[in-house]
Amino acid sequence: MSDTIFRVAMQSTRTGKRVVVNIPNRTVKIDGVKVIDRGDYSGNLGLRKVSPEVAFRHIEEAYEQYKYSSPQSGGRRNRCLFKALKEDELNGTQILECNEEARTRLEMTVLIYAMNGSLVIPEGMWYWQSKKDKDLVILKEWLNK
């Protein structure tokens, strides 16, 4: 069984490679090499299509991991589309994992679910906001490519 794009991105982050996910442009680069280019890719994305309810629940879980992740010096926290707590807002019991891994997991989850059609925002709405955490917002324009 070959590795999926999701697994490769996560493993690359763990080993210190730079993973850049651009959700609006549907592009993923690992150490400067595009593995998804404007929605075009080769291989298996790694997340199967699910209902919007399940997709949003998975995104909420990934966001919680990101929001309470440990900041890293030189990390991309300030360039992520999603809000995370600042270091002085975290207490020792809240820190769940490394920020870069959590960021990659969150951004890849949103991107793949957008690409495979799992994320659907109802007509007349221009965004989805989590009821669990109001800081988590997915813009409709990220999904309609």
Image: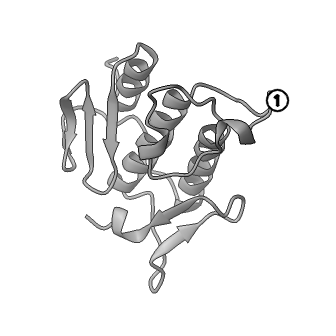
At 38% from the left and 48% from the top, the residue drawn is 111
Front-most of 95 and 7? 95
Residue 113, percent from left and from top: 42, 51
Q: Residue at x 35, y 69 (%)?
A: 141
Could you tell me if residue 11 is visible in this image? Answer: yes
Residue 126 at x, y = what percent? 44, 78
Relative side of 1 to 38, left or right: right
Q: Residues within 10 Å of mark 1 (few under 14, many from 20)?
A: few
Q: Quadrant of the C terminus?
A: bottom left
Residue at 46% in and 17% down: 14
Q: Secondary structure at mark 1?
A: loop
The spot of residue 121 in percent (x, y) is 47, 72
Residue type at numbered disc 1: Thr
Name the residue carrying label 1. 93
In which image quadrant can residue 47 be found? top left
Q: Quarter of the image containing the N terminus?
A: top left
Residue 42 or residue 64, whichever sits in front: 64
Relative horizontal placement of residue 71, taking residue 93 as reference (left or right): left
Please give the name of the residue rendered at 42% of the width and 22% of the height, measured from the top-left corner: 13
